[in-house]
Image (tube, rainbow, N blue to C red):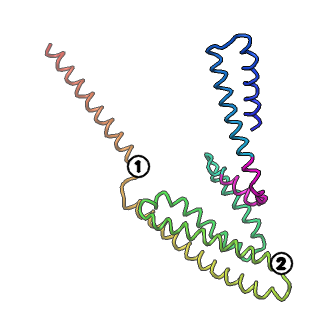
Amino acid sequence: MRRWTVTAGGLAATSAVLLPYQGLGPWDAVWAGLTGASAVFAWWRWSDLRELAAQPEPPPLDPAQAGERWLAILSQLPGGYSVAEGIRRQRVRGGLRGSEAAEVWERLDRCARTMRELTSRLGGSDPEAVREAGRVERELRELTDRIISLERAMRVAPAEAQAPLRELRDDHLSHLRTGVAAYEEFVVAAASFVAESARAGEPAPMVTGLTDATDRLRGVTAGLSELRRLYGDLRVTG
């Protein structure tokens, strides 16, 4: 707003100074157009300022949300996804220190990383299974977050509130263990499917490419030999 206001004022002052000295000319139309455009932009920015000033002040951004926003931006950069995942993993590990869910979460994280490696090869065969696996992984991670929150509440809760919180935590932990065990079985089945598909399917792309290149070289060699033989026959005939 300030920039466009200053620009409009400077162009208007320049036009006012040059007009008495040189009179009206082609360049005056340019100065007038630039002045008018700058004035319109300045008016729009002033309107935006009034509208924003009338809105209530937004609540301060949660540091965790701000950090997650930066991680989401980092994930879009080349090679940034693995870095962002590593930062998220270390953050969760810090929250799980001393938690009953730490060992189960480690199993879930290993399976999730394995599943991401299999997704590119499994997605074309059964995309619905891949989507279902992603949904289950998200739900299991959310369940882990709830367990962490309950354990934090148990540390500060009074004695009479410990029993209900512990019972709810144990129930969530039982569901988490059951879900992670089922997820592990799915990942093992997916890995077996990919291995069997590679074994029973076509040769690997690099093998196919080498075979094609070998056939082409053999064809070229045979053609050169035939050409050399024909050239020799022509010389003898000549």
Residue 49, percent from left and from top: 74, 45
> Which residue position is annotated with label 1?
205
Compared across the picture, whether 125 is left or right of 184 comes to left
Q: CA distance from mark 2 to mark 1?
A: 56 Å
Q: Residues within 10 Å of mark 2 (few under 14, many from 20)?
A: few
The residue tagged 2 is 155
Residue at left offset 51%, top offset 72%: 186
Q: Could you say whether the residue bearing mark 2 is in a helix, strand or loop?
A: helix
x and y, in percent, of residue 14 in the image: 74, 20
State whether the magenta stretch is mostly helix, strand or loop: helix
Of 205 and 104, the residue lying toward us: 104
Against 186, residue 115 (above or below) is above
Amino acid type assigned to the residue bearing label 2 in the image: Arg
Please provide the residue range marked out in magenta: 50-72
Which picture quadrant has residue 91?
bottom right
Q: Are marks 2 and 1 in contact (CB under 8 Å)?
A: no
> Which of 237 and 129 lies nearest the eye of the viewer?
129
Disc nearest the viewer among 2 and 1: 2
Residue 86 located within the stretch drawn in magenta: no
Q: Secondary structure at mark 1?
A: helix
Characterize the local packing of mark 1: few (<14), some (14-19) or many (20 or more) Cα atoms within 10 angstroms: few
Q: Quadrant of residue 238?
A: top left
For badge 1, the amino acid type reads Pro
